[in-house]
Image: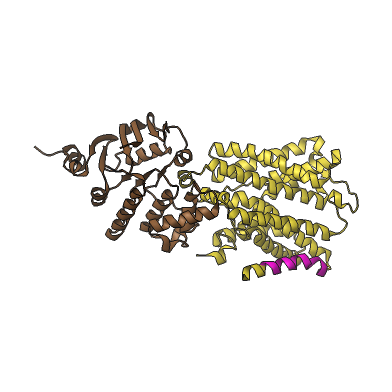
Chain colours: A brown, B yellow
Amino acid sequence: MTTLLEVEELSKRYGGLQALARVSLSLGEREILGLIGPNGAGKTTLFAAVSGFVRPDEGRVGFAGRNVVGLPPHAISRLGLARTFQLVQPFPRLSVAENVMVGAFARHPAPRDAHRHALDVLELTRLDALATRPAHTLSVGLRKRLELARALATQPRVLLLDEVMAGLNPTEVDETVAVVRRVRDSGVAIILIEHVMAAVMQLCDRVAVLHHGELIACGAPADIARDPAVVAAYLGEEIH
Amino acid sequence: MLRKAGLAALLGAAVAAPAVIRSEYLIGTLILIYFFAFVGQGWNVLGGYAGQFSFGHALFFGIGAYTSSLAFIKWGVSPWLGMWLGAAVAVAVSVVTGHLSFRYGLRGAYFALVMLAFAEIFRVAATNWEWVGASFGLLVPLRGNAPMLFQFAVKRWFYYVILAMLLMATAGVARLQRSRLGYEMVAVRENEAAAAALGIDAYRVKLIAMALSAGITALGGTFYAQYFSYVDPTIGFGSANSIEILLRPIIGGAGTIWGPLLGSVVLGVLGEITRGFVKAYAGLHLVLYGVILMVAVVFLPHGVMGLWRRH
C-alpha cells in the first residue's frame, strides 16, 4: 500500500502543556484511520498542525512529495489535503449549494463548472434536497454534513474529519457512516477523529490512540479495544 | 423576466428624467444621489462583499480628486485621463495600506481605525503642502462648456456622466457577485478560517478587493472635483467624507448589488425633506444621518435590502 500522508515525530507545546509529543502516523491509499483519545489528548491539535493552522515545534508532515510544515493552510488545501472543523464553520449567509461551490472553485475555476460539481457532491452526501437553503437554517447534524461536503468539494486526496458524528442521533450517525464509506470508495483516504465508538469500529481500517499528546497505540480496531494501555487511558488503571 | 422589465423601466426613467424635469435643483439632487451610490458601490466591494469595514475611504476619494485636478492645473491633462491616473494612484496606495493591514492580520475595529489613520495622514499632508494648495485646496479652472475637459455648462451632462458611471459600477459588481472572486470575498467575510481550509488565500482576496474598491472610489473623487470645481483637504480626505461614503451602502444593504443605490435614494429623499422643513437649522441633516444609521444598524442589520431578502 502506498503512503499518502506521513506524520513524523510531530511535537507541539503550549506553555507547560505538551499538546503533541513526537507523534508519528502514516495513512495509506483508501484507508480510514480512526483517531481516538480522551478529551484534551491532542487530536484536534494534530489536525491543526497537519493542515497548517498551527505550526508544530518539531517534526515533519510528508504529503504530495514534500514536507508541508510551514506552508499556510490554503496552500496545503490546494495540494489536496482538506479538513473539517470540530466546531462547524459554515458560511451562514450563503446557500448550501453556494457553500459547497466555494470549495469546488479549488478545482473548477468557472462558476458554472463549480456549481455542477457542487451539485454532484451534494448528491454524494445526500444534501441535494437542501441545495437552496441558507446554511444558517440547517440543524447541527446537517451542518456537520455540509462541513464534510464542502471539504469534499475541493477534491482532496486526504480528508481530515473532526468529530463529524458528535451530537447526531443514531439515524444521522448511520447516514454519515454510509457517506464516509462512499467517500472512501471514491478514492479518498480519511483520518477520522471520533468519540462515537460504534462508528469507529464499523468504519476504520486502523485506529490510533492519543493520550496526553502521545501516541499510545495503533492497530486494528478489535485489538485496540482490548489493549490494556488504551483501557487504562479511558477508564484509569486497574486496582490491585 | 419581471425583474428584467422592472430594471429596464427604471433605466428608461433615469435616462429620460432630465428631459422631463425642468428644475436644475432637482437634477442636482439626483446627481448627488447617483454620485453617493457610485462611491458607496466602491466601498461596498471591500466593506460589503469582502467584509473589511473601512472607515477611511476618503483616502481614495481624495487621491482621485487631487490627482486629476493637479494633473489638469499643473500640466493641462484632461480630467478624463486624469481620473484614470487618480484611480491608478489610489490602487497603488491601497496595495500599500492593504498589505500593511492584512499581512499583520488587522480585522474589525483595528482595520477600520488604521484606514481612518491613513486618510488623516493624507489630510494633514495635503493641508501643509503648498504645491497642492495647502489648506485652501484646489480650484479647477473653468473653461466654459468644455466636454473634452470634463466641464459642462448645463447640469444635464454631469447627470448623464454620473449615471453612466453608476451603471458600469453596478453592472461590474453584479458580475463580481457571480464570479469566483466574488464568492471568495464572501467566504473570507463569512469565515476566514473556513475559507483558508478550502484553499482560499484570504490575504490575496482582501488585497484585490481593496484595490478594486480604491479604484472605483477614486473615479468618484474626480467626478466630485469636476462637478464642484473645487476640492480641499477636508472635503477630500476628511473623516466626515469617509462616513458619507460608507453610510449609504450600510443603510441600503452592504454586500448587495442594489444596497448602495437604495441607501442613497433613502438618504437623498430624507435629506431633502428635512432641508425643506428646517431650513433655519444648518447641519440638522447630519443629526438625522446619525439617527438613521443607528436605527438601521439596530433594526436592519442587513440594510433595507434585508427587508425582502429575509430568509
**Residue B14, image x, y percentages:** 75, 65
In the rendered image, residue B11 lying in the magenta stretch gets the answer: yes
Q: Nearer the viewer, residue A201 or B265?
A: A201
- Residue B171 sits in quarter: bottom right
Q: Nearer the viewer, residue B160 or B305?
A: B160
Q: Is residue B217 left or right of residue A9?
A: right
In the rendered image, residue A81 lying in the magenta stretch gets the answer: no
Residue at the outermost left position: A240
Residue B232: tell me if it is visible: no
Residue at the outermost front position: A1
Residue at the outermost right position: B144
Classify the position of the C terminus of chain A by image quarter: top left
Residue B192: tell me if it is visible: yes
Q: Is residue A125 left or right of residue B15?
A: left
> What predominant SS class does the magenta segment belong to?
helix
Q: Is residue A195 left or right of residue A72?
A: left
**Residue B138, image x, y percentages:** 82, 43
Residue A57, above or below A192: above
- Residue B109 sits in quarter: top right
Q: Nearer the viewer, residue A79 or B220?
A: A79
Classify the position of the N terminus of chain A by image quarter: top left
**Residue A151, image x, y percentages:** 42, 48
Residue B90, above or below B274: above
Q: How many marks?
A: 0
Range of magenta residues: B7-21
